Amino acid sequence: MERKTVVKFGGSNLQKPEDFQKLVKVVRNYNKPIVIVVSAFCGVTDKLTKTMTDDVNSTQNIKLICNDLANIHKQIIFHNISNSEASKNTFSEVDSLITELESILNIFCKYGRSNIELKDLILTFGERFTATILNAILINYKIDSELIFPENLGLITDGRFGNSRINFNLSDEKVTKKLSSEKTFVIPGFYGISEKNQVTTFGRGGSDYTAASIAKIINASSLDFWKDVDGLQSADPKIVTNPTQVTHLNYAEASELAYFGAKILHPLSIEPIAEKNIPVKIFNINKVQENNLPETIINKDNCLTKTIKSITYSNDFGIIKLEGSEIGYKAGILSLITSCLNIAEINIKSVITSQTTINLLLSKNDLKSAGLILQNNQIETVSSIKIIDDISTIAVIGNGIYENYENASRIFSAITKSKINIRLISFGATDSSAYFIINEQDKNLAVKAIHAEIFETKNAEFYNTNSL
């Protein structure tokens, strides 16, 4: 049996009802059964999140919110399903989901605003709506398609709410069996089901992780992401005027890019497929042709030349700085600090130390709670704890970045010429990236300066991302 391709369509592909026609064209062009994973229609997850954070405390308000969501999705059906009977049946399916959502929202607003299980369940409805409608549209176009929700697929998670992971040992057999028939399957991304039959989500952007996990389980021929841009770029086109297209990355480079803020891939989407050497292909949905070539390919292969591929950034990081004159001499202090944060399930992104200071790089969302935990534990030799949140992390990505002595020189020369102060530097943690921390207000200037030095000067051909 031919290995199936897993195809991921994101919310950026689905901004208006007519966009579903692009998806139909893509699916037809594969000319074989595929596995489709979808995100929510653009803006729907934000609406659901806002509903839970706003002071929505009346049945009438909830009814208005659900009517709005119903209208959004019924417009999609109206524009894309011509058969009246099929359209009527799909309207009915959406109405059933709306009724279920309305009931859960009423329970949440009356009794369970702190209930993380209900929050996860509510947030999955965007993907459920999209998958239900896309499956009906494909059938309307005579494509043999079947809708499967993760709870019926057997996509078992570790049970953590808001940030769960797939339990592959428990998922592999059932998922493989469910997806074995020669038809196209449509699956809502973003969530799975725990062993206790509780819906748990993978975090924002987690549909990429769903697609990668399914690709690993069925040993897909490739994992294809359809985006609304020309693959990966040498920098954010919103900052740099003429970025270079990156046609190839290895798994390590792609992981570092995603980790340090490149929005085109979820940070967790590389690890599952790297284990099976499954290639990732990124296509532009606005360039759909019968024989599409990917804009970017990600696989295990390294470029023959050591090149810088891209400059990325993130505003999501913050620093907790622990200071004390004897920090460098006290055995076990770092272990104690990490244990305190581990109990609270706070992830430490990176640690940079000196004799008198420990700098913890955390998500900004975790800074306040982490600072409070460490203060309450009154760690010996720590005389002060400072929170720094006005920073950006700039990362320069490229396999073998340390093997050319000019790389560091040119990067920091560009920063120096731009009169930007570097607050922290990390070189050598990986062969694929170097990162440094600057004031958030200097982010755009730093990205432009490094990009100009590496990709736009007379020596730029040495760093050309397309050279092999």
Image (spheres, rainbow, N blue to C red):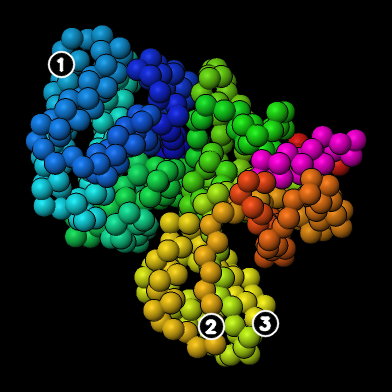
Q: Earlier in the sequence, mark 3 or mark 2?
A: 3
The amino acid on which the numbered mark 3 sits, given as a three-letter code, is: Gln
The residue segment tinted magenta is: 443-461
Q: Is residue 360 above or below residue 30?
A: below
Q: Secondary structure at mark 1?
A: helix
Question: Are there few (<14), some (14-19), or many (20+) residues within 10 Å of tag 1?
Answer: few
Q: Position of residue 127 (x, y in %)?
A: 30, 36
Q: Position of residue 148 (x, y in %)?
A: 26, 38
Q: Is residue 16 above or below residue 327?
A: above
Q: Earlier in the sequence, mark 2 or mark 1?
A: 1
* Residue for badge 1: 88
Q: In whole angstroms, how far apart are the C-alphas of marks 3 and 1?
A: 70 Å
* Residue for badge 2: 382
Q: Residue at x 63, y 70 (%)?
A: 352
Q: Nearer the viewer, residue 129 or 84?
A: 129
> Is residue 128 among what the camera can see?
yes
